[in-house]
Amino acid sequence: MAEMPYAAAVNRALAEELAHDERVVLLGEDVRAGMFGTTSGLVQRFGEDRVINTPIWENGIAGMALGLAITGLRPIAEVMFADFMYLAMDQIANQIASWTYMTGGQTSVPLVIRTAGGAGFAIGYNHSQVTESAFVGPPGLKVVAPSNAADAYGLLKTAVRDDDPVLVFEHKFLYFVPQEVPDEEFLVPLGKANVLRPGDDVTIVAIGSMVGKALEAAETLAAEGISAEVIDPRTLVPLDQETIFGSVARTGRLVTVEEGRKRGSVGSEIAAEVAEKVFGSLKAPVVRVAAPDIPVPPGPLAESMYVPSAERIVETVRGLVA
């Protein structure tokens, strides 16, 4: 095992995939310079033909990636901030997601779009959102949200080798958190959740940056005699319903936790699925812990109040099991 920051794990995965398959190309704004360190040094190793700087043009970056993918390459496109994935929505939702279907399966779209989202730096609304929930709806997309360095490495490598379009939502606050990553190459399968802590009283499904806070909350709850099972879905589409439903059927309670806003959230979709499939097992209503339905506020104090905390998760669970 080697300890490395999340960003370094992403960089390692990119380097290995560029070396593994000459059809892999990397494109985006300042990818040669290496924003957040995720693409640093790659142009020196693989050349300007495979590590391609683009204009500040998110919709164009996505469109270029689609063109490269359907003509034989395996592009990895970078949208620097997840807020600006909305600018690429037309290409992603109307073109990339539907291309295989619209061609009757004659053309696959083996591309990855990476982006960095989330708060933690107090840099304001347009650079602090998490936007995964907006992309779980269009059929044809796979959506990944790694919560740690090992998953950032293993899920990205799997995404690059997948023949369908995969959106990878990384969290920029996690980029600088060092964690253990196995020295040997490995892949993490899409659609398989990770049960990080077993429990009997409540199921906590936490996404991305909230996984660490959910584990912290579970420790506090354990000291109070409340046993919380913490599940990281890792892949939002396809969602590992089997693992989540099985846990909820056993614990009878579900709390979803995410940094995004509550309205139209990923947690809303999970709650609806649980209500449809395992309603008879529920001992209490499903509760969603998420950000309020307002823009991400500027400034560290306001931002810290906006983003869900471990304490808020603890209070929510206490209310369910009381």
Image (cartoon, rainbow, N blue to C red):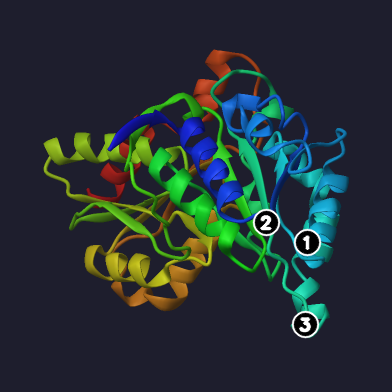
In the figure, is residue 128 to the left or right of 120? right
Can see residue 257?
no
Q: Give me the C-alpha separation between circle 3 and circle 2.
A: 24 Å
Disc on the earlier residue, 1 or 2: 1
Gap between marks 1 and 2 measured at Cα:
8 Å
- x and y percentages locating residue 307 in the rendered image: 51, 30
Task: Indicate which label's residue lies in the foreground, 3 or 1.
Answer: 3
Query: Mark 2: which secondary structure?
Result: helix
How packed mark 3 is, by other alpha carbons closer than 10 Å (few <14, some 14-19, many 20 or more), is few
On screen, residue 177 versus residue 262, left or right, reads left
| Vertical side of 114 occupied by 97: above or below | below
Q: Which amino acid does label 3 sit on?
A: Gln
**Residue at mark 3:** 106
Asked if the residue under mark 2 is in contact with the one under mark 3, i.e. CB atoms within 8 Å, the reply is no
Give the residue at x 38% y 60%.
193
Q: Mark 2 points at which residue?
A: 135
Note whether 237 is above or below 263 in the view shown.
Answer: below
Q: Which of marks 3 and 2 is nearer the N terminus?
A: 3
